[in-house]
Amino acid sequence: MLVGGQKLFRQLKDLRVWRFFILVVFFLMAVGGILFSLSKGAMEISLGQIWQSFTEESQEPWAHVMRNIRLPRTLVGALVGINLSLAGTILQCVMRNPLADPGIIGISSGAGLAGIIILIVFPHNTHLLVPVAFLGAMGAACLIYILAWKGGDIQPMRVILAGVAVSAFLGSFISALMIFYSDRVHGALMWMAGGLSARSWPHFKVILPYTLLGVLIAFYGAQKLNILRLGDEIARGLGLKVEAVRIGLTAVAALLAASAVSVVGLLGFVGLIVPHAARLLIGGDHKFLLPAAALLGTGVVTISDTVARLAFAPVELPVGIIMAFLGAPFFLYLLRRES
């Protein structure tokens, strides 16, 4: 028994070391993605100049580009990556479906419809964009939750089917609004594609408080997510109020997704790819999975946005196109594996 206990202790120690190593790798990837985004573009900015822009008040053109264009855009991209990755991680556990993603199951469409209404119909009320998008996301989430409920439990496949139906239904309203308000459609089209073009300090100030709030609540709920993984019956036996926790965590995911959508538009597949990659490397313990997904999401979005800027320069692609190019085959692979 003593030998068995020592072996188990070594295995747990090795697992902790591995998880720490993966978190360090993801952290370095996040930092690398941010530096890559800051340095590359129409004007090359060296690492020394990046450091100098933080420590000195230089009036050189590169300093202006760095402080007023690259830095806010990169920070917005990092926060969007964190929000969508955490939202996807939470939804995959709460909905008990590895294919759950804010974009795929329709939550982003709910936020998108609400956002389009503000942008096109009430353009002078953009200060209401995030709270209205949250209401839209939460409404879509509740509708999907009701449609996926059968026999006293959530059916994972019904989550995807309900999400596709809800997304198509809400998408038809978005298309109708764009037809009726065709004179205001250009900005909405760019918003629907999901992009970081022209994102600046005001956008950073909009998304930052929602990111901080969502991250704090998500990390606080990590243990509850671990209990939900065990199944509803076991979770209830452990004293967890399953439905209240599920609804509360869904609201957190909706807030994170809505704040991201309200700033960059309908950016899809981040919440699908990142949680899976992080879970594959670090395991299903949400105490480690949530920070790993946040760090990896930062790296994925900032690197993808930089590639979108450089691939066909001087033409700039929305980062949503890059994510769709990567995410659609990944989704089909997961769909075949789960079926």
Image (tube, rainbow, N blue to C red):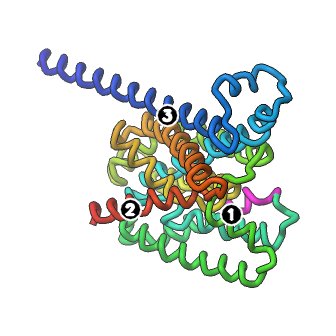
Image spot of residue 243 (x, y percent): 48, 56
The residue indicated by pointer 3 is 29
Task: Say if 23 sits above or below 174 in the image.
Answer: above
The residue indicated by pointer 1 is 191
The residue type indicated by label 1 comes to Trp
Q: Dot 2: few (<14), some (14–19), or many (≥20) neighbours within 10 Å? A: few
Was residue 130 drawn as part of the magenta stretch in this picture? Answer: yes
Q: Dot 1: few (<14), some (14–19), or many (≥20) neighbours within 10 Å? A: many
Task: Say if 211 sits above or below 153 in the image.
Answer: above
Observer-nearest of 80 and 1: 80
Image spot of residue 19 (x, y percent): 37, 29
- Sequence-first tag of 3 and 2: 3
Mark identifier at residue 329? 2
Was residue 110 drawn as part of the magenta stretch in this picture? Answer: no
The residue type indicated by label 2 comes to Pro
- Lateral position of residue 229 relative to residue 82, left or right: left
- Lateral position of residue 36 relative to residue 105, left or right: right
Observer-nearest of 158 and 283: 283
The region drawn magenta spans 127-133
Image spot of residue 254 (x, y percent): 59, 56
Q: In which quadrant will I find the N terminus?
A: top left
